[in-house]
Amino acid sequence: MNAGWRTVRLGAPIAVLAVVVVVAAWWSAAPSFGSLVSDEWGRLVLFLVAIALGETARLTILTGRETAPMSTAAALGLAFSTIAADGRPGVGADVVIAVISAGMLVGQVLRRVTGSGAQWGDTAARLIGASVAPLLFRQVHFGGRTLLDWEKEWGRDRWLVAVVMLLVGAVAMLVDLTLEACIRADAQESPLLPAILDEYRSVGPLATALVTSGALIALAEVAIGVASVPLFLFPLVLTYFAVQRYASIRTTYRQTIGALSSLTDLAGYTGTGHGQHVADLAVAVGRDLGMSHRELTDLEYAALLHDLGQVALREPIPRGATVMAAPVDQQRIASDGAEIVRSTGVLDQVAGILQAQTTPYRQVREFGQDLPLSSRIVKVANAYVDLAGPDDAQDEHAMERIHLGLGYEYDPRVVDSLSRVLTRRRQRASS
């Protein structure tokens, strides 16, 4: 992968751009607020309240980050709504963006007051994405008129209006997801392009639902007025509770696997926290190599459970360092661990990773064997932790030993990634 995709860090520029958007919108909209009538004020305040409350009802999605679907849907609905009393032109994009930013800001303040903690990074990305919709719909001219002007002229062709809203909303969501992926890649120090693609795959269905909800709010407002806002946000409220329950189940699932991985620690086969240490390192390498969130989840589970087969040993391996054991013993530990995991009936992918974790890389290089990347990562991460010892005291020695087996035991690409991860850790520790 191109090195530039690894080194570009866009978190700070995105935050600066969001501030510029907010300041510019309020500066431009300030004169317009004085000319709004009470009906227009009422509609804007309703949308502002919906956006603010939506910010407090956040979901943790598959990529591990938080998002605010109700806030985003309300912002898109505001972007497409006329927000005008009878006979008056619709408000401009600057007013809409100013209200969206105010709603998101109030929401973050409410989160801070309630102790939930503000999330400024992803909020900046969503604000920029949400600002794209009103700019395209209300500001950009096509044939001398804006899309909002075209909407008023299309009259009964509401299906055409809906299509345009969906297209504009899709563009806005693409901007949003791309920027949020940039922030996540920045925070996790992972390659940018894979993070963007993973964001699209993971959040695409939810983004589609939000765009549709925003369009429905705006279209229904013509017929039923501001009642369209709570009416079409209500399904997202139900989704919120369903996803929260699912997230709770996943948390319990992860805790169960963590408890299972500690069996070898409690039985004295491995040092305290060995499995977690290997998992943290393996996940960092997986991120550096651009693995998707779903792949990283399986990798983390496999790394946590990689020594589970040691519970079948009659005598513990000194310090639990399987890298020092004979190849036949390593294979037996891997097979026993894989069988234990496979018996659960729900972790077959993880069992396959464990089964292949001791296979030498030369099997791929010389015989073309299909060896999962996750297995190669667990092999390298476990070797490093075993050889480096407590607190990575012998990290240089560990890397020297690993390099001796480069291309034979260990995948060179994984070892290079491990070197990058360790270098970044040292830089953070020294800064």
Image (cartoon, rainbow, N blue to C red):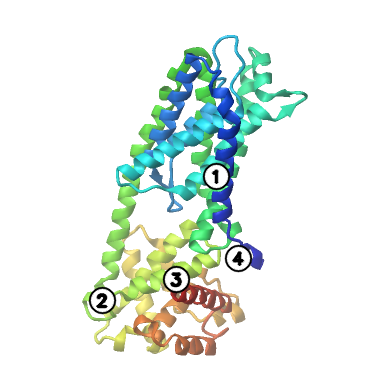
Quadrant housing the N terminus: bottom right
The residue lying at 31 percent from left, 68 percent from top is 340
Say if mark 2 contacts mark 1, CB within 8 Å. Answer: no
State the image coordinates of residue 395 (x, y, percent, origin top left): 44, 85
Q: Which circle marks residue 19 in the picture?
A: 1
- Residue on which disc 2 sits: 265
Q: Which callout, 1 or 3, points at the residue further toward the start of the chain?
A: 1
Tell me the residue that label 3 is attached to: 282
Residue type marked 3? Ala
* Horizontal and vertical percent position of residue 54: 40, 35
- Callout 4: helix, strand or loop? helix
Mark 3: few, some, or many residues within 10 Å (few <14, many ≥20)? many
Given residues 244 and 428, the one toward you in this image is 428
Disc 4 residue type (three-letter): Thr
Q: Residue at x 58, y 83 (%)?
A: 407
Judged left or right of residue 415, residue 333 is left
Mark 4 or 1: in front is 1
Callout 4–callout 3 Cβ contact below 8 Å:
no
Q: Position of residue 138 (x, y in %)?
A: 64, 27
Frontmost of labels 4 and 3 is 4
At horizontal 52% and vertical 39% (from top left) the residue drawn is 207
**Distance of label 1 from label 3 (alpha carbons):** 37 Å
Circle nearer the viewer, 1 or 3:
1
Q: Nearer the viewer, mark 2 or mark 1?
A: 1
Nearer the N terminus, badge 2 or badge 1? 1
> For this view, does 335 lie left or right of residue 154?
left
Q: CA distance from mark 3 to mark 2?
A: 19 Å
**Cα–Cα span, label 2 and label 1:** 49 Å
Residue kind at label 1, given as amino acid type: Val
* Of callouts 4 and 1, the N-terminal one: 4
Residue at which label 4 appears: 7
